[in-house]
Image (cartoon, rainbow, N blue to C red):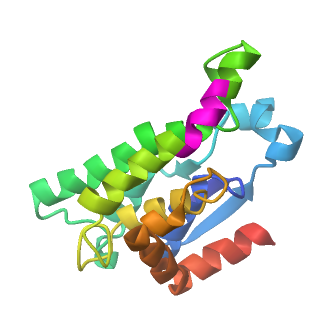
């Protein structure tokens, strides 16, 4: 049985949605960041990084959203969440999700978690000030060069879509002007219409 460790309002929502889309049999464990549960020994035994998501499988535990999404897609091929029969197309999926992980999410984290990179309050404040620009620039690239539409990879829904949706939910908080991102906003609205998205969000809000 697959077990997903998640926290509300974090990137773990992407993996949660993907499990729903795949029709997987799984259970969830909520990690409460408000009480620093991610740093407790019990959770660090699951994920020493002290972050979410973590996916416990029969073969071991996976961390990092791109890896978890690829695992879900490959474990449930009938769901058609990734183009495994086309090496270049699958590499494009991985490239997009890697960009979200290594660039977009990191830029967002500068708003609330600047102390990961600096101790000087002025430096932390400057990182926070920069967020609308840095996150906005990343989404400009997605809007004009990466989001093919109607889904990230074009006509076929993939594991890129729940990941983009999850991070796009943070745009208002990051101070990004949504009027310059009509394709991203349309994608986000389209995602809200999917039953798997509604189910995952509903569970995380309970």
Per the rendered image, the range of residues in magenta is 126-132
Image quarter in which the N terminus is found: bottom right
Image coords of residue 156 (percent x, y): 26, 77
Looking at the image, residue 195 lies above or below residue 144: below
Looking at the image, residue 8 lies above or below residue 50: below
Which residue is found at the position 67% from the left and 54% from the top?
A: 173
Q: Is residue 195 magenta?
A: no
- Horizontal side, residue 90 vs residue 99: left or right: left
Dividing the picture into quadrants, the one containing residue 51 is top right
Residue 203 visible in the snapshot: yes
Residue 23 visible in the snapshot: no
Is the stretch drawn in magenta largely helix, strand or loop?
helix
Image coords of residue 68 (percent x, y): 44, 51
Image coords of residue 132 (percent x, y): 56, 45
- Horizontal side, residue 30 vs residue 105: left or right: right
Dividing the picture into quadrants, the one containing residue 86 is bottom left
Image coords of residue 179 (percent x, y): 49, 68
Which residue is found at the position 72% from the left and 73% from the top?
A: 203
In-front residue for pair 154/127: 127
In this view, the residue farthest toward the top is 120
Image quarter in which the C terminus is found: bottom right
- Horizontal side, residue 103 vs residue 3: left or right: left
In-front residue for pair 14/140: 140
Which residue is found at the position 44% from the left and 64% from the top?
A: 180
């Amino acid at each position: 049985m697959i077990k997903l460790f998640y926290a509300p309002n974090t990137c773990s929502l992407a993996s949660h949605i993907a499990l729903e889309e795949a029709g997987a049999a799984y259970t969830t464990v909520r990690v409460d960041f408000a009480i620093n549960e991610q740093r407790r020994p019990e959770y660090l035994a699951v994920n020493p990084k002290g972050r979410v998501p973590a996916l416990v499988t029969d073969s071991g535990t996976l961390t990092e959203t791109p890896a978890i999404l690829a695992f879900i897609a490959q474990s449930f091929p009938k769901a058609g969440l990734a183009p495994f029969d086309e090496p270049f197309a699958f590499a494009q999926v991985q490239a997009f999700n890697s960009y979200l992980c290594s660039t977009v999410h990191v830029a967002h984290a500068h708003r609330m978690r600047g102390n990961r990179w600096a101790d000087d309050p002025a430096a932390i404040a400057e990182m926070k000030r920069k967020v609308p620009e840095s996150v906005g620039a990343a989404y400009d690239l997605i809007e004009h060069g990466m989001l093919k539409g109607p889904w990230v990879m074009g006509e076929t829904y993939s594991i890129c879509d729940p990941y983009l949706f999850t991070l796009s939910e943070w745009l208002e908080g990051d101070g990004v002007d949504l009027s310059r991102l009509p394709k991203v906003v349309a994608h986000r609205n389209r995602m809200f219409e999917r039953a798997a998205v509604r189910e995952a969000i509903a569970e995380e809000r309970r």
